[in-house]
Image: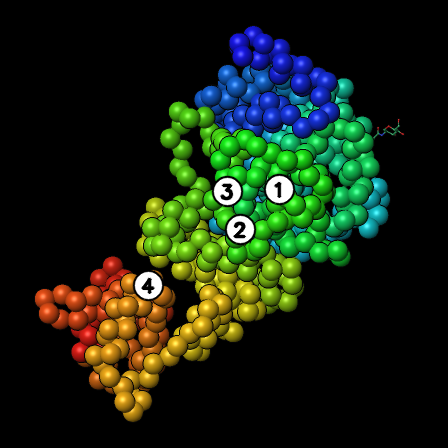
């Protein structure tokens, strides 16, 4: 298609379409990308390929609206072609804080105009922190009579649903609304009220393949529901999509929880809407670094999903899960963020405290997961059968154990080992009454070695990069 026809088509789609249109979606995705360039580059419209591929904007009428408290951020601007105003809300799932402390319980929403409506507290707080700024910018740019073009990704897409509701109540005209990879924003009544306000407005929720975020918080008749109909992209790559209902079992809801993945999240029509233009060498988000780190350590994708789902499920019972521990948890998150920043997030076990925190959150507190049997923990985390081997059992055979360990390692089984309380353990650098992870099992120079990782409070003296080797004889 020639550039000219394409431009005309885009313009045509923008002004008259009511059906889902990927060309419109792509133009909107490039507005979303621009927000990921950060405040300075956004306000100077130095936004890489978005300059050419997003709708033409008035570079004098651009505003960055953000809150340092919630890390919510959005770009607002006036568009020249097509004429209108846009609001692009950045997703904040990219930061560890929002993931760890996402408050997934319901809170009242605009009871005056939306009786019985409830929305997800964490997303709503993020929205409230930028709401006034968004409407002030629209007013300053004279957008009351202009068509609005709304786009958001992830948590930003949930915030966008609340924003759209308020904008419609204030009699703004929404031309297009594309919510990319949105979590569930609230209860069924909120969805109904939003759809009633929308009428025939072009508003969609896009979901990609096995993205986990569109399944958060978990759905239920009395609980969380999506608000907008879904456009479902059925494959990891490619642009085949299907038009679906609000909560449609044949679309994104077709997957089991353990099939869901974080890696399908930052996607729209084969481009990443959460990255600034191609030319920028942007720091990856903390969450991406976390994923990269986790992959380096071969943390199974299923386990990553488990971490995220534990958070979500726990959030559903938030009051019970976090009562009394919220302060401590917030503190840990701050410390963790500071630590990852100062370490350049290359701290080798970056995912370990996250998993531990998720696990503690699911069980009510850190105290509830302190101590216990390794086999129970592995069963709980993996759902697979486990085995404990006691070295003091009659008939214990070190040779047989060694062969089995080598076999287990080759099969990728997670392994751990616990020590008894005898003082001579100190001589080989181990603590008594303590649990260790077994990371590796190898035969070197005719000797057998078991690589271990320190658990909490491990013996410091022989530590080398959090890992040390112990001969098989010593271990047994
Ligand atoms: C929006 O329009 C309706 C119908 O014209 C009117 O009743 C209402 O007062 C308007 N609301 C605002 C906030 O201007």
Mark 1 or mark 4, which has the lower sequence index?
1
Q: Nearer the viewer, mark 3 or mark 4?
A: 4
**Crowding at label 4, few (<14), some or many (≥20) Cα neighbours within 10 Å?**
few
Q: Nearer the viewer, mark 3 or mark 1?
A: 3
Who's the residue at 36% across and 65% down the image?
413
Choose top left, top right, bottom left or bottom right for residue 112: top right
**Crowding at label 1, few (<14), some or many (≥20) Cα neighbours within 10 Å?**
many
- Whether the residues at callouts 1 and 2 have beta carbons within 8 Å, the answer is no
Let me know if residue 139 appears in the view: no
Residue 330, given in percent of the width and then of the height, sits at: 53, 57
The residue labelled by disc 3 is 264
Q: Nearer the viewer, residue 452 or 39?
A: 452
**Whole-Å distance between the Cαs marked 2 and 3?**
9 Å
Mark 1 or mark 2, which has the lower sequence index?
1
Let me know if residue 313 appears in the view: yes
The tag on residue 260 is 2
Secondary structure state at the residue bearing disc 1: loop
Q: Is residue 152 left or right of residue 15?
A: left
**Whole-Å distance between the Cαs marked 2 and 4?**
23 Å
Mark 2 or mark 4, which has the lower sequence index?
2
Q: Is residue 309 left or right of residue 449?
A: right
**Whole-Å distance between the Cαs marked 1 and 2?**
15 Å
Q: Is residue 243 left or right of residue 311?
A: right
The residue labelled by disc 1 is 182
**Whole-Å distance between the Cαs marked 1 and 4?**
37 Å
The residue labelled by disc 4 is 411
Who's the residue at 43% across and 44% down the image?
288
Q: Is mark 4 within 8 Å of ligand 1?
A: no
Q: Nearer the viewer, residue 49 or 35?
A: 49
């Amino acid at each position: 298609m020639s550039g000219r026809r394409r431009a005309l088509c885009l313009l045509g789609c923008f002004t008259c379409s009511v059906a889902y249109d990927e060309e419109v979606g792509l133009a909107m995705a490039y507005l979303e990308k621009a927000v990921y360039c950060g405040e300075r580059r956004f306000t100077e419209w130095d936004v890489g390929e978005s300059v050419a591929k997003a709708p033409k904007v008035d570079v004098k009428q651009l505003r960055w609206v953000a809150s340092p408290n919630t890390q919510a951020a959005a770009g607002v601007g006036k568009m020249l072609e097509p004429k209108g105003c846009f609001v692009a809300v950045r997703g904040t799932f990219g930061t560890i804080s929002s993931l760890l402390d996402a408050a997934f319980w319901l809170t009242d929403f605009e009871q005056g105009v939306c009786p019985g409506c409830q929305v997800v507290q964490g997303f709503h707080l993020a929205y409230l922190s930028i709401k006034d700024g968004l409407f002030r910018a629209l007013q300053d740019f004279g957008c009351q009579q202009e068509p609005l073009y709304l786009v958001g990704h992830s948590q930003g897409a949930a915030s966008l649903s609340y924003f759209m509701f308020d904008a419609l109540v204030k009699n703004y005209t929404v031309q297009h609304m594309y919510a990319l990879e949105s979590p569930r924003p609230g209860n069924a009544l909120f969805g109904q009220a939003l759809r009633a306000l929308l009428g025939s407005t072009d508003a969609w929720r896009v979901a990609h393949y096995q993205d986990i975020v569109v399944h958060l918080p978990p759905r239920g008749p009395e609980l969380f529901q999506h608000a907008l109909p879904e456009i479902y992209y059925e494959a990891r790559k490619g642009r085949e999509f299907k038009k679906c209902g609000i909560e449609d079992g044949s679309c994104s809801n077709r997957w089991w929880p353990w099939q869901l993945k974080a890696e399908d999240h930052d996607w729209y029509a084969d481009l990443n809407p959460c990255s600034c233009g191609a030319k920028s060498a942007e720091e990856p988000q903390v969450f991406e670094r976390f994923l990269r780190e986790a992959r380096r350590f071969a943390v199974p994708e299923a386990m990553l999903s488990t971490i995220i789902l534990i958070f979500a499920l726990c959030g559903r019972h938030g009051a019970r899960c976090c009562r009394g521990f919220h302060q401590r948890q917030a503190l840990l998150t701050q410390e963790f963020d500071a630590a990852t920043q100062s370490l350049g997030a290359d701290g080798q076990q970056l995912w370990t405290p996250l998993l531990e925190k998720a696990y503690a959150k699911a069980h009510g507190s850190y105290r509830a997961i302190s101590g216990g049997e390794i086999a129970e923990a592995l069963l709980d985390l993996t759902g697979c059968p486990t085995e404990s081997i006691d070295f003091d059992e009659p008939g214990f055979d070190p040779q047989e154990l060694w062969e089995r360990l080598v076999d287990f390692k080759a099969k990728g089984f997670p392994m751990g080992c616990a020590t008894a309380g005898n003082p001579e353990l100190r001589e080989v650098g181990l603590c008594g009454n303590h649990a260790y992870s077994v990371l590796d099992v190898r035969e070197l120079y005719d000797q057998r070695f078991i690589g271990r990782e320190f658990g909490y409070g491990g013996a410091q003296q022989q530590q080398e990069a959090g890992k040390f080797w112990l001969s098989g004889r010593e271990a047994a």
